[in-house]
């Protein structure tokens, strides 16, 4: 489960080493291993990343989300029936809770390592890419390692690279793919919303009775938004 509210209690260094070690063993196209990891513990750096997130990244996302009707916007950007400027302020005021996490792991990508895999995977099209798939594989192993150690984690996507690169002094050719805050959970677990197996599994041949039309997909999104809003508007344990 994605935990978007972590306690600031410290995490033992050996736990972080184990999590990083798990990421190192991830699958990647032709084993080209396009990842590097940064471990952020310095609160000043965390706060600077948080500022880049709320003021640059989320400003961009916020205004893109304005282009669709409120009910279909990403839950983090559904912040009440007020005018756009007030909504924007609410998003910004909410800040980046993950800066409270004792440790942030930043997943970097080195696109040049794609040179190790088949050229077909690099072609621009609907089914790119061995690159970001590999980064997510590494991150997934790290999420599982964290969970197995009794910790909690989250996936914070970076959409606007430059401000984060400036904070971390990351070279131009690398990608700041996402941030994985790690710590102990501040919230109670709750059931997550995932599509049932019978809707998504096909045996031997594709079962067209399960195929969703474009309209079905949009209706699914309406329903999903309704069910997952709470994940972004959580209450701390005991509140
Ligand atoms: C590619 C990808 C990007 C994601 N980006 C974000 C993000 O930017 N912020 C966030 O809070 N969660 C993010 N998530 C987490 C998903 O929202 C979450 O996994 C999903 O809603 C299912 O919920 P669960 O992990 O609690 O089961 C991301 C997950 C993936 C795989």
Image: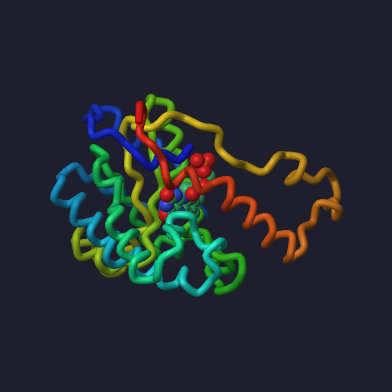
Does residue 34 appear left or right of residue 50 in this picture? right
- Quadrant of res 164: bottom left
| Residue 36 percent location from the top left of the image | 32, 51
The residue under the point 40% across, 64% down is 111
Does residue 173 appear left or right of residue 114 in this picture? left
Residue lying at the far front in this picture: please name it.
Answer: 82
| Residue 23 percent location from the top left of the image | 40, 41
The residue under the point 85% across, 46% down is 204
| Residue 99 percent location from the top left of the image | 25, 46
The residue under the point 83% across, 43% down is 203
Q: Is residue 50 visible?
A: yes
Q: Pick whichever, 12 or 56, lies toward us.
A: 56
Q: Pick whichever, 80 or 203, lies toward us.
A: 80
Badge count: 0
Q: Pick whichever, 165 or 18, lies toward us.
A: 165
Q: Is residue 147 above or below residue 25?
A: above
Q: Pick whichever, 210 or 202, lies toward us.
A: 210
| Residue 15 percent location from the top left of the image | 30, 29
Q: Is residue 98 above or below residue 80?
A: above
> What colouring method underlies this structural image?
rainbow
- Quadrant of res 165: bottom left
Does residue 48 appear left or right of residue 89 in this picture? left
Q: Is residue 100 above or below residue 218?
A: above
Image quadrant for the C terminus? Answer: top left
Q: Is residue 31 visible?
A: no
């Amino acid at each position: 489960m994605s935990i978007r509210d972590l306690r600031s209690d410290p995490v033992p260094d050996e736990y972080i080493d184990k999590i990083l070690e798990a990421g190192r063993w991830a699958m990647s196209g032709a084993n080209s291993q396009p990842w590097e990891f940064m471990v952020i513990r310095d609160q000043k750096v965390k706060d600077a990343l948080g500022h880049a997130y709320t003021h640059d990244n989320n400003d961009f996302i916020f205004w893109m989300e304005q282009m669709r009707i409120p009910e279909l916007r990403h839950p983090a950007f559904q912040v009440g029936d007020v005018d756009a400027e007030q909504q924007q302020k609410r998003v910004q005021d909410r800040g980046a809770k993950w800066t409270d996490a004792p440790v942030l792991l930043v997943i970097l990508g080195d696109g040049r390592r794609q040179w190790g895999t088949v050229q077909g995977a690099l072609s621009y099209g609907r089914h790119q890419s061995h690159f970001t798939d590999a980064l997510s594989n590494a991150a997934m192993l790290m999420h599982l390692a964290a969970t197995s150690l009794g910790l909690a984690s989250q996936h914070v996507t970076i959409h606007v690279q430059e401000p984060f690169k400036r904070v971390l002094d990351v070279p131009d050719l690398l990608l700041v793919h996402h941030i994985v805050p790690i710590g102990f959970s501040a919230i109670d677990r709750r059931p997550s919303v995932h599509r049932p197996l019978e809707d998504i599994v096909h045996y031997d041949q594709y079962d067209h009775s399960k195929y969703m039309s474009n309209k079905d997909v949009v209706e699914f999104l309406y329903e999903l938004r309704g069910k997952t809003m709470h994940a972004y508007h959580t209450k701390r344990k005991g509140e």
